[in-house]
Image: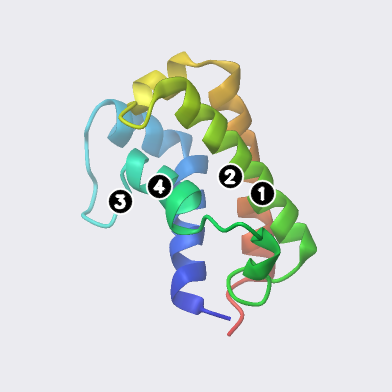
Amino acid sequence: MNPQVRSRLSDAVAALSDEELHERRWLRGVMMNEDEMDFDDAVLLVVDELATSDPSELIGHILVDERELVAFVHLSDALERLVTTIGKFGTFQDAVNSGKIWLECLDAAQALRGLLNLAGSPE
């Protein structure tokens, strides 16, 4: 297990799930600390940095089991649809304006966050 990459995924999923962060940081630009992830960084981690032709390879490296894999693929697919809709330079406001597409991303992120928190950070 790669705890650093898993931690980065967990941070991205937490940011994508955190509606207070969305309102405060991503819409109003109010940063509480320098560790807060930007919208584009969170999206790019999932759709670019962790992209693979065979997502099952992530099990044992970043993900613990098949349940996490299914949730990760669901989030990745939802974010891919979002990026296709808003463009690669789309903003968080564009994401919100996409309506149902963003809500699917939010739901998928919350589901994966629950699984990642349940499993913790195995080494």
Q: Quadrant of the C terminus?
A: bottom right
Q: How is the image coloured?
A: rainbow
Tag 3–tag 1 contact (CB < 8 Å): no
Amino acid type at image mark 3: Glu
How many other residues sit within 10 Å of disc 2, few (<14), some (14-19) or many (≥20)? many
Closer to the eye: label 2 or 3: 2
Q: Residue furthest right?
A: 66
Name the residue beneath numbered marker 1: 73
Check disc 4: other Cα within 10 Å, few if <14, some if 14-19, many if 20+: some
Instruction: Give the labeled residue for mark 3.
Output: 36
Which residue is nearer to you in this view: 1 or 26? 1
Residue under circle 2?
Answer: 76
Name which quarter of the figure residue 64 lies in.
bottom right
The image shows residue 120 at horizontal and vertical percentages of 62, 71
Q: Report how far apart the C-alphas of labels 1 and 2 lie in the structure.
A: 5 Å
Residue type at mark 1 is: Val
Task: Tell me the distance, in whole angstroms, between the alpha carbons under discs 3 and 1.
Answer: 24 Å
Q: Are marks 1 and 2 in contact (CB under 8 Å)?
A: yes
Q: Secondary structure at mark 4?
A: helix
Q: 31 above or below 120?
A: above
- Residue 69 lies, in percent from the top left, at 71, 58
Q: Compute the Cα span from label 4 to label 3.
A: 15 Å
Please report the residue visible at 60 percent of the width from the left and 35 percent of the height from the top.
78
Mark positioned earlier in the residue sequence (1 or 4): 4
For marks 2 and 3, give the CA distance. 21 Å
Residue 80: give x, y in percent of width and height: 53, 36
Q: Determine whether, in the image, residue 109 is placed left or right of residue 22.
A: right
Rendered image: mark on residue 44: 4
The residue most toward the bottom is 123
Q: Is residue 117 visible?
A: yes
Gap in Å between the C-alphas at discs 4 and 2?
10 Å
What residue sits 51% from the left and 60% below the top? 10
